[in-house]
Image (cartoon, helix red, strand yellow):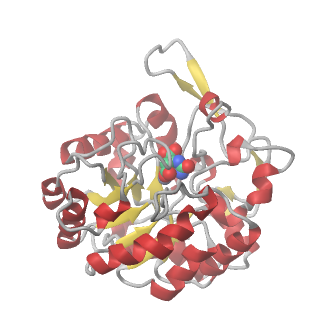
Amino acid sequence: MSMPDDWHVHYRDGNMLRMVTPLVRKRFWHTLAMPNLDPPIVTNERASAYKEAIHTSSPDEHDMYNKPTHVSLYLAETLDPQEVANAPEHVKAIKYYPAGLTTNSEKGITDPSALWTRGTRAHEVLCAAAEKKIVVCLHAADGKNAHGVELDPYDQEPHFMAESLPRIRDAHPKLKISAEHLSTKQGADYMLKHGGPLLGCSLTAHHLLLDRRDVFRGGFRPHRSWMPAIQSIEHTEALRDLAGKGLPFVWLGSDSAPHSQAKKESDCCASGVMMAHAGIELYAEAFDNMNALDDRFENFACRNGARFFNVTDGHKDKKRPSIHLQRLKWKVRKPFMVWNDTDELQHYDVVPFRLGEEIEWTLS
Ligand code: NCD
Ligand code: ZN
């Protein structure tokens, strides 16, 4: 098949970036890097420096320069709409984080109504994005209901789909919106009803492969914990149905999000798990389970996102290579070791998804 694209990946920075980049770039052609670094990426200057850092973090720099890397800006209260208006070609998205709902989201938006209320900075940013035809990627979750009451984590995405997304779309009718890592039946239903040239979504392999029983089997499993949370089987099945329909507004975004083992196995387990070591293999498994390893898989992985993010015309895209996937099991044997950024004599481990277990497909 053609080399696929990953429209939602956390490369991180420092030595973690050096560990992640080769794994991602072995598998993916276009990639969209997420901006939730500490501090977050809120200027074009930093976005460009980050793109450069991703490129130079590969041992094979020449190869890297041939692969299209896109970056996103973080929709913080401090993001200046002028930055969006002046964004360079490689800034392909603005990422919305509801404050406090996931990793490094503290600088995100505290009140989602800012997105649809004239006069706020966030509203101006979305207007600038619509004008410049830059996609806004939404972490589609609300933290509170209209009365200010904290929502149950399993209700955050359904609430956003019912209350926030329609208002954002009404306020910005020309804006291109991607709802990221859909996790619920309500999300899938919303896409079936409203998906099209201006609205699409990314799906992760973990939301297609797992359901809530897997997260709590025998006790809580921190290395199966993301935000948005894995939901019950009815939701997983709705996401599988959506993926299996072969719709043009549904695409691959792995949300590979590595953390140190210490941050995962802690009093407050960090959201996110590394998927990059098997970034495409796990999707092959998910689509194989759905009997959808045909054009639907290739469109989902290689075409739909590229079309939505408007990258299909560039000369680089014409050079897109092929990859070969085989139905051949392998075992994830070891954690990944990363040297500490501040003390390079120390290192820590990152536990990848399915450590000690098998993956059904091999990239050869
Ligand atoms: C992501 C991370 O670790 O950066 N975590 C996650 O659970 N998906 C942040 C995000 O995309 O929500
Ligand atoms: Zn993410």
Q: Is residue 133 left or right of residue 356?
A: left
One can see residue 292 in this view: yes
Q: Which residue lies furthest to the bottom in this view?
A: 193
Name which quarter of the figure residue 348 lies in.
top right
Q: Nearer the viewer, residue 60 or 288?
A: 288
Q: Which residue lies furthest to the right in this view?
A: 218
| Image location (x, y in percent) of residue 218 | 87, 46
The residue at 61%/57% (across/down) is 152
The residue at 50%/62% (across/down) is 253
The residue at 33%/36% (across/down) is 39
Q: Which of 306 and 340 is in front in this view?
A: 340
One can see residue 256 in this view: no
| Image location (x, y in percent) of residue 42 | 25, 46
Is residue 193 positioned above or below 349 on the image?
Answer: below
Q: Residue furthest front?
A: 147
Is residue 185 positioned above or below 147 on the image?
Answer: below
Quadrant containing the C terminus is bottom right
Number of marks present in the image shown: 0
Name which quarter of the figure residue 46 lies in.
top left
Name which quarter of the figure residue 244 lies in.
bottom right
Q: Is residue 294 left or right of residue 90?
A: right
Is residue 239 positioned above or below 121 on the image?
Answer: below
The residue at 67%/66% (across/down) is 208
Q: Is residue 207 left or right of residue 113?
A: right
| Image location (x, y in percent) of residue 165 | 41, 73
| Image location (x, y in percent) of residue 17 | 45, 36
Quadrant containing the N terminus is bottom right
Is residue 244 positioned above or below 61 on the image?
Answer: below
